[in-house]
Image (spheres, rainbow, N blue to C red):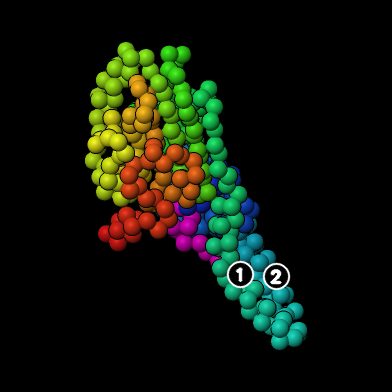
Amino acid sequence: MKLPCNVIRDLLPLYAEDMVSPESRALTEEHIAECAACRAALEAMGAKTPDVQFRMDTAKEFVKYEKKKKRKLAAFIAGVTAAGVALYFFVHFLLVLGVVGLVLLDGALARVKVDTDPSHYSMYMGENAEQEYRTKWGMDESIFPDVLTDGMEVLDYKMVYYNPWDSQFLSYLTVTYSPDDYAAELDRLEDCGDTPYLGIYGVTGFAGEDDPIAIYSDDYNGFVYAIHTPDKENTITYVELIFCNYFYDLKYEKYIPHEYLPLGFDAHPNNPYKKKMEKN
């Protein structure tokens, strides 16, 4: 059974990090052996292309083994009762959908990572962040502070990372500044500018403010922004909502206070904005 290119592209980041099951690896390498485009995509990730001939032979042996198992299973079921025959067809149907099962298995192994320790901030933000948190789909994170200093009173912090097959990020940081530092930070954020955001993922604005202090929006990957924190003087909340494919796999409302989200924001799997963009 051969996987289509779109499934292979979803598996390649996991394959490059050696985080796929043996079955997924075999099917991926069989495809790479025959598909130059997917092989080039793997190389673009900086991963070493496998010995495709050897891997293709291994994958073919795996496929032969699976077919042999199916033949034995069919021979066994042929001799049982009508209930056994019905069970055979049910199992056969599941085997036809085996590729979906492999993909779901890989996704099920993913875990949501949550970190609320501000001392770990530099692990996830900026140029010195650890590799898996550094690029974040090319989103501009310059709205967030480069570092946390002793003069910043961190009231709230959370970093959420989820990668079932595509990496997704959700972070927020609430900081109270001295009056002088607050004024300086507003000047810095003004220089960050903003990009149009109304209508993207259903956003209509922000609670209590006509506009965020600064915002970077992307009609595919989400938002990075800073807002005045409700009911707190000299306090700014920084937020990033970063995902792909027009939706979060992550149940994002579980991890962020509602008042920090843009009004109307909807990045659920079947959100109207996703349907509109895919239709276009």
**Is residue 278 placed above or below 183 in the rendered structure?**
below
Amino acid type, label 1: Leu
- Residue beneath disc 2: 69
Q: Position of residue 185 (x, y in %)?
A: 32, 20
Q: Residues within 10 Å of mark 2 (few under 14, many from 20)?
A: few
Residue at x-position 58% and y-position 44%: 111
SS state under label 2: helix
Q: Position of residue 23 (x, y in %)?
A: 62, 57
Q: Can the viewer see residue 56?
A: no
- Residue beneath disc 1: 95
Location of the C terminus by quadrant is bottom left
The answer to if 59 sits in the magenta stretch is: no
Q: Which residues are magenta?
A: 1-9
Counting residues from the N terminus, which is met first, the one under dot 2 or under dot 1? 2
Residue at x-position 29% and y-position 22%: 186
In the figure, residue 269 lies in which quadrant? bottom left
**Is residue 200 placed above or below 46 in the rendered structure?**
below
**Is residue 37 placed above or below 260 in the rendered structure?**
below
In the figure, residue 56 lies in which quadrant? bottom right
Q: Can the viewer see residue 202?
A: yes
SS state under label 1: helix
- Left or right placement of residue 98 versus residue 225 in this view: right
Amino acid type, label 2: Lys
Q: Position of residue 141 (x, y in %)?
A: 37, 31
Q: Position of residue 207 (x, y in %)?
A: 32, 39
Residue at x-position 46% and y-position 52%: 9
* Camera-side mark, 2 or 1: 1
Location of the N terminus by quadrant is bottom right
Pick the residue in front: 34 or 265: 265
Cβ atoms under marks 2 and 1 closer than 8 Å: no
Residue at x-position 41% and y-position 41%: 258
The label shown at residue 42 is none
